[in-house]
Image: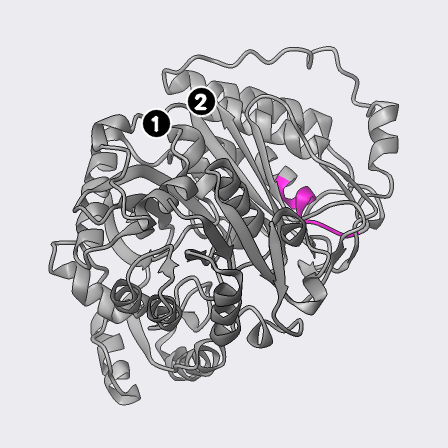
Amino acid sequence: MFKKVLVANRGEIAVRVLRACEERGIATATVFSDVDRTALHVRYADEAYAIGPAPSRDSYLRIDKIIDVARRAGVDAIHPGYGFLAENAEFASACIDAGITFIGPTPDAIEKMGDKQTARETVAKNGVPLMPGSRKGLRDEELRATAVQIGFPLMIKATAGGGGKGMRVVHDPNQFTSALLAARREAVGAFGNGEVYLEKYISNARHIEVQILADSYGHTIHLGERECSIQRRHQKLIEESPSVAVDESLRQELGRVAVAAAESVRYVNAGTIEFLFDANEEKFYFLEMNTRLQVEHPVTEFVTGVDIVKEQLVIAAGRRMRYRPEDIRPTGWSIECRLTAEDPFNNFMPNSGIVTYLKEPTGPGVRVESALYRGYEVSLFYDPMVAKLIVWGENRAEAILRMRRALNEYRINGIKTSIPFHQEIMDSTEFIWGTFDTGFLDRRQLVAKSEPDLEQARIAAVAAALVAHEAGRRAVHIGGHENRSNTMNSWKRVGRVGAMGGRW
């Protein structure tokens, strides 16, 4: 096993990896920008090194600086976390050239799966079903002709894309040219590559992904699926495992196809195969592969008991994976809410400030991964996600109720957060019944309430129990609600004054 690992990232994921290393008895080092000098990951690491100004292009994206720190710190390996350089083939190659293990897949796998068109062509050779779309390298006039063949609605997607950048949905053929130009401009700005391709657009699709692990001895397994359909502007907000849309037969088929996709590039380490599922036709299509650890990996860890980050360390060290397919027996249900420093009352405008008070929820089946502490200053330089709240329940009904309870306990003062938004989602009948899809938020236009609705909370609790009962699972007993007054308890009312600059 490694003696020392450099975590080349920041925020909650850096803390998550540092903890895994400590539990394996591995010494750690990390990097920080000028604005992150007092960040939590700097406090957790054994060693921390400054790498430049706040903008990521001058710090966390500087391959030369990170390799220099790795040499000075004398590390055996580098864990990239997610984001920044996690899916950068040049960075993975630089680690290898420096004699340092990159905790992730090979540069070749990253490069092939990083280009969405190349990824489609590669996995198709292993029988992975593809969404109808265009070939690679087409000019604008060729794309226009292909669009007519595919039919509308369709989606324009950047080949080097991710995170919703360089992506446009086109319903009207007359809007195709303007959408194409806009997608190219955005792709150039985000990835330095304006190449795009076309793909059939499925209304009311569900976003399902499968977690895989693979070692260098030819063993590849899947850890079941995650549901990621609750999205805003193509950014995931809530994830859960398993998915209400997937039965056991479909689960096995998704897993088989995901393993085949990974094996098409001789993939090693942790990765995720993403699919679009057409519930109306009961068909799924390959979307892309993320050649890194995912933000939502904790929900899979909760239901399988597999520590994915520790397994990454084991695989990268050249050891055999500790699990076989028969060892993976998912139990219960897990849900994750991504908490962001954004104002849900003001179109999710990014928010900055100093955390003046922090109380994280605890109790059975509750896990918090956070970059926050009291006195920490949240800046606008990086992704607005500041924490993740993950819960586990024996079934989906219990998981929803536990998430509602945990969100109600969460207190973050000094900055505005997305907690009220997630509270409203947990109260949504459509979410409780599991009938949502990727267009859920576009249809509903949810706006967080300023006061909790206890009557709605009772209805949500009863509905959740009914869903579990109809699924043949043990119904969750919901007690203590029948005689509750519609008037909020005084201590709760006082506790919520001042949160987000007002009431929750």
Which residues make up the magenta segment? 415-422
In the picture of the structure, the residue carrying the numbered disc 1 is 330
Q: Position of residue 498 (x, y in %)?
A: 86, 43
- The quadrant in which the N terminus is found is top left
Mark 1: which amino acid? Pro
Q: Residue at x 52, y 14 (%)?
A: 476
Q: How is the image coloured?
A: one colour
Sequence-earlier tag: 2 or 1: 1
In the picture, residue 141 is in which quadrant?
Answer: bottom left
Does 185 sit left or right of 384 as displayed?
left
The total number of labels drawn is 2
398 left or right, relative to 140: right
Whole-percent x, y for residue 197 in the image: 30, 75
Q: Residue at 66% of width from left, 71% of height from top?
A: 54
Q: Name the residue nearer the viewer: 209 or 344.
A: 209
CB under 8 Å between discs 2 and 1: no
Quadrant where the C terminus lies?
top right
Looking at the picture, tell me which residue is in the foreground, 443 or 165. 165
Viewer can see residue 504: yes
Above or below, 220 relative to 464? below
Q: Is residue 419 magenta?
A: yes
Would you say residue 227 sits in the magenta stretch? no
Eye-nearest disc, 2 or 1? 1
The circle on residue 257 is none
Q: Which mark is residue 395?
A: 2
Q: CA distance from mark 2 to mark 1?
A: 12 Å
Task: Pick whichever, 184 or 306, lies toward us.
Answer: 306
